[in-house]
């Protein structure tokens, strides 16, 4: 199976590297600078599950010709999505499917509008990784889960072939029968975690130790859940309680990727995460004051820091 990974950053580089490690046919669609870096140093990932070093991984630049790809793995940030859509158009053939790993839900509308419902699978990942100044992928916690599936939940021929290609890689690749529900569940969790860690500029541990810090996390989740349920998101019964328990149990020093981006004064996904929810709250006539405060905080950051 021929796999095109858009970018070779913290997420695409890690999972693409794990697939290359088991000799899958992976090509990275990269910019000129990253191409030179990979040619010179190889694809390197440091992980507690075993380091990865791939010398001279296959790369292409946007517009370069390539044989047909079976699947395109898309793990860009939301603010790069439209550019990525244009970059991959030339590589989407009749047989190609697109497997996005972006957080949130808004990107699904953009992808299906560009390529059609049939082309777009559901996907998500749970991983803490970052790219250091030398282009090395650094995994910072034990979690490295990659979840995928047909949005209909069907076990189609193409999804089973994809499962076979992923099988045996040194990461937790899992086929889901309920991928859309899992994507909404992750969106709810990430909205809560990234919301409060960015608001308080702190890892989750000190936040939940404070009475009103934990109360803010609970209210963030409550508001996000109410909006999602109101627009028909397939949230399971009891997911709110389960996610608050998870907030209480995750590592003390856990940070969201959004918070890490702010610390590096990089662009953030404020509109993709929180603007999307607040727009729908406004249409539905729902109040979401904590989400509004989180969103305002992020927009002020964008104004002052970018």
Image (cartoon, rainbow, N blue to C red):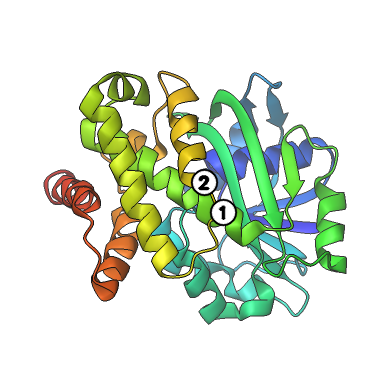
Q: Secondary structure at mark 1?
A: loop
Q: Is residue 124 above or below residue 81?
A: above
Residue 257, by quadrant, is top left
Residue 114 visible in image: yes
- Asked whether disc 1 touches disc 2, contact meaning CB atoms under 8 Å apart, the reply is yes
Q: Residue at x 65, y 38 (%)?
A: 145
Mark 1: few/some/many CA within 10 Å (<14, 14-19, 20+): few
| Residue 280: percent from left, percent from top | 32, 69
Q: Quadrant of residue 248?
A: top left
Of residues 108 and 22, which is closer to you in this image?
Answer: 108
- Do we see residue 6 in this rendering? no
- Quadrant hosting residue 37: top right
| Mark 2: few/some/many CA within 10 Å (<14, 14-19, 20+) | some
Q: Residue at x 55, y 62 (%)?
A: 234
Is 300 above or below relative to 227? above
x then y, percent, for residue 240: 46, 44
Task: Describe the element under mark 2 as helix, strand or loop.
Answer: helix
Query: Looking at the image, which is closer to me, 50 or 156?
Result: 156
How many labels were placed on the picture?
Answer: 2
Nearer to us in this view, 179 or 52: 179
Residue appearing at x 73%, y 65% in the figure: 153
Residue 191 position (above or below residue 276): above
Read off the residue under disc 1: 236
Reading the image, the residue beneath label 2 is: 239
Residue 294: image tag = none
Alpha-carbon span between mark 1 and mark 2? 6 Å
């Amino acid at each position: 199976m021929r796999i095109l990974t858009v970018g070779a950053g913290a997420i695409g580089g890690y999972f693409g590297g794990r697939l290359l490690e088991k000799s899958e046919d992976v090509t990275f669609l990269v910019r000129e600078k990253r191409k030179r870096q990979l040619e010179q140093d190889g694809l390197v990932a440091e992980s507690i599950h075993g380091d990865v070093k791939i010398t001279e991984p296959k790369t292409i630049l946007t517009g370069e010709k390539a044989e047909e790809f079976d699947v395109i793995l898309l793990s860009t940030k939301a603010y790069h999505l439209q550019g990525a859509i244009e970059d991959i158009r030339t590589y989407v053939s009749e047989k190609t499917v697109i497997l996005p790993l972006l957080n949130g839900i808004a990107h699904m509308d953009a992808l299906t509008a560009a390529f059609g419902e049939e082309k777009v699978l559901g996907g998500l990942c749970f991983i803490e990784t970052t790219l250091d100044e030398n282009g090395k992928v650094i995994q910072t916690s034990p979690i490295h889960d990659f979840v995928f599936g047909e949005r209909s939940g069907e076990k189609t021929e193409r999804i089973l072939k994809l499962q076979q290609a992923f099988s045996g890689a040194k990461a937790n690749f899992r086929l889901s029968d309920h991928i859309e529900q899992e994507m909404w569940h992750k969106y709810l969790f990430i909205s809560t975690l990234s919301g409060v860690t960015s608001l308080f500029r702190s890892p989750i541990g000190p936040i939940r130790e404070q009475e009103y810090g934990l109360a803010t996390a609970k209210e963030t989740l409550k508001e996000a859940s109410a909006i999602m349920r109101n627009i028909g998101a397939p949230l399971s019964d009891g997911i709110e309680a389960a996610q608050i328990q998870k907030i209480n149990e995750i590592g003390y020093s856990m940070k969201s990727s959004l918070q890490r981006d702010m610390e590096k004064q990089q662009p953030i996904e404020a509109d993709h995460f929180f603007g999307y929810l607040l727009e729908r709250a406004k249409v539905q006539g729902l109040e979401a004051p904590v989400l509004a405060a989180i969103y305002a905080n992020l927009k002020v950051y964008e104004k002052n820091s970018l």
